[in-house]
Amino acid sequence: MSLLLKAVQLEKTHHQGDQALVIFKDISLALHRGEIVALVGPSGSGKSTLLQMIGLLDRPTNGSVMILAKDAGVMNDDERTLMRRHKIGFVYQFHFLQPEFSALENVMIPQLIAGISKVKAREEAMKLLSEMGLAHRVHHRPARLSGGEQQRVAIARALANHPVILLADEPTGNLDPQTSAEVFDVLLNRVRSAGIGAIIATHNMELAQKMDRILIMNNGQLQEQRAA
Ligand SMILES: Nc1ncnc2c1ncn2[C@@H]1O[C@H](COP(=O)(O)OP(=O)(O)OP(=O)(O)O)[C@@H](O)[C@H]1O
Ligand SMILES: [Mg+2]
């Protein structure tokens, strides 16, 4: 299996005045191609903090993050932005779609930023949104989509530049159980068919059990539980 991501002895400490707040230290993990990993743990345990670090949105206080065998710690901000844009897709708990743009445009924008032509970007956005069951909603702005539809657009957007790593932070956290399960199935199918790797933070153990591995964050430590 090819290694996509490796984090070694990550530490995150917040400094407030002369107080040091250690969120975690000595966290290590690896993600391989074709793997879907659940990240669970109580609120405040550091799941989002960890995802932001391995998604290159934040830097660890100590430790290293390797993406495709490249050490992100020695990259400058521009190099990290490029790596994020081309290799990593991120789905947030609240979709953060651009309200003034349609679903189609929201999925086109990251591609245009990456230098893809408008025609190609549109084609790919149509394809992804159709796969998400949204072919009939592509011209709707986010406010005219249901919560589940908005999350599916956000997933399509995260996949638009063909990332090798998909990171999702409670992607279905604000949806009802049925919609949450549906959106989740779409996400898992897509990750499996694209053969990429994913780490998905969730509070829903039922969803976590559908993944290949479960990592539990608790008291600053990361433990592995084999999925049933
Ligand atoms: N800028 C900051 N300064 C100080 N502490 C912070 C800062 N940002 C986050 N924290 C703390 O870090 C801890 C971990 O937060 P994080 O958001 O990673 O938790 P989480 O596991 O994602 O929780 P949830 O399940 O509620 O989303 C929390 O206790 C939070 O208060
Ligand atoms: Mg969180």
Image (tube, rainbow, N blue to C red):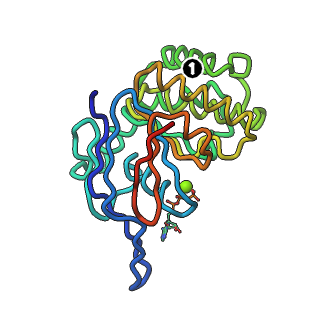
Q: Residue shown at 60%/25% (left/top)? A: 186
Q: Is residue 141 left or right of residue 114?
A: right
Give the camera-side residue of 90 and 225.
225
Q: Residue at x 40, y 76 (%)?
A: 15
The kind of residue on which mark 1 rests is Leu
Quarter of the view holding residue 164: top left
Q: Nearest the camera: 121 or 216? A: 216
**Which residue does the image show at 66% across and 33% down from the upper left?**
101
Q: Which residue has dot 1 on it? A: 128
Quadrant for ligand 2?
Answer: bottom right
Q: Is residue 209 above or below residue 123?
A: below
Q: Residue at x 63, y 30 (%)?
A: 153
**In the image, is 25 to the left or to the right of 181?**
left
Q: How many marks?
A: 1
Q: Is residue 142 left or right of residue 221?
A: right
Q: Position of residue 160 (x, y in %)?
A: 49, 26
Which x, y percent locates residue 119?
A: 51, 14
Helix or strand or loop: what does disc 1 sit on? helix
Badge 1 density bin: few <14, some 14–19, many ≥20, Cα 10 Å:
many
Residue farthest along the bottom direction in this orientation: 18
Q: Which quadrant of the figure has residue 221?
A: bottom left
